[in-house]
Image: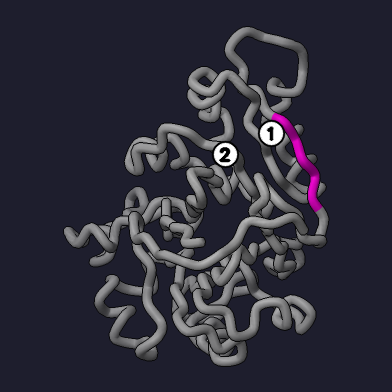
Amino acid sequence: MTGTFTFLGTGTSQGIPMPACSCQVCLSTDPKDSRLRSSGLVQINNYTICIDSGPDFRYQMLREKVQALDAIVYTHEHRDHIAGLDDVRAFNYRQQTPMPLFAPREVVLALHESFSYIFKGNYPGIPQVEINEISEKPFTIAGIPITPIPALHKDLRVFGYRIGNLVYLTDAKTVEEPSRSLIRGIETLIINCLHESPHPSHFNLQEALAFIEDIQPEKAYLTHISHLFGKHEEIQSKLPSNVFPAYDGLKLGFETSLSKV
């Protein structure tokens, strides 16, 4: 079965263009250099799953004309990955059902803290959500098998996800062998790559390429890109033939199946 992955955003926590910045990337007129906060949309068999709901969630749903959203899966608790949760209200109203959220315990706790009003009482119009706490074990959503890929964002645990022949892994700095063994030889790998300089909590270009070389995917796409990395075309010129800088709105096809884990 063929699914579709859409890059909703491919930028860092501040996005591109960044406020108050006049660098060549932030002033670029190339739409591929305009990057919202990183997240993705998975569509399989008329089922739609969002990976993260960052600050640009509302606009991303409008841009992609998403008419129905069936679940949100979270990678970690940083604000650039959870801050847009309130805007599930539109889907609550349209679908007349709570939004299923799938998240590790750390994210569940952060959602309760950041959106305490959602979980306190029945104030009119608040988002309606259904929390599903996940671990490092595989799980399913509507029969779609999903395998968490644990990594470290400096000292913070983050989850990437393998869905069929596609892996989405962002905000990673360290990926240990047990996680690597789950994804070696994957067809499509999506991995964060901040820029070329070393960074304490993200892959830089050298680290991302070394990771790709170890995993040996057919194709790899870089996301969570900083304005310090350069323009889209400049980034592409620095990459191997099977590695590409992702951009907002890019759609990828991938193979998966429906089953129960």
Please, what is the three-letter code of the amino acid marked with disc 1? Ser
Which residue is at 35% across, 89% downward?
241
The mark nearer the N terminus, 2 or 1, is 2
For the residue pair 242 and 1, the one nearer the viewer reads as 1
Q: Position of residue 216 (x, y in %)?
A: 55, 89
Residue at (40, 86) in percent of width and height: 242
Q: Nearer the viewer, residue 199 or 254?
A: 254
Q: Any mark on residue 114, and which?
A: 1
- Left or right, 130 with respect to 237, comes to right
At label 2, which amino acid type do we have?
Ala
Report whether 205 appears left or right of 137: left
- Residue corresponding to mark 2: 83
Q: Residues within 10 Å of mark 2 (few under 14, many from 20)?
A: some
Write the start and end of the magenta stretch as one range.
Answer: 130-134
Q: Please, what secondary structure does the residue beneath circle 1 have?
A: helix
Q: Which mark is residue 254?
A: none
**Residue 77 visible from this viewpoint:** no
Residue plotted at (53% across, 74% down): 189
- Quarter of the image with the C terminus in it: bottom right
- What residue is shown at x 40% (from left), y 64% (from top)? 252
Determine whether the residue tagged by mark 2 lies in a helix, strand or loop. Answer: loop
Q: Is residue 133 magenta?
A: yes
Q: Position of residue 112 (x, y in %)?
A: 75, 33
Q: Is residue 47 above or below residue 33?
A: above
Q: Main secondary structure of the magenta part?
A: strand
- Quarter of the image where one finds residue 182: bottom right
Residue 85 falls in which quadrant of the image?
top right
Report crowding for label 1: few under 14, some 14 to 19, many 20 or more residues within 10 A (C-alpha): some
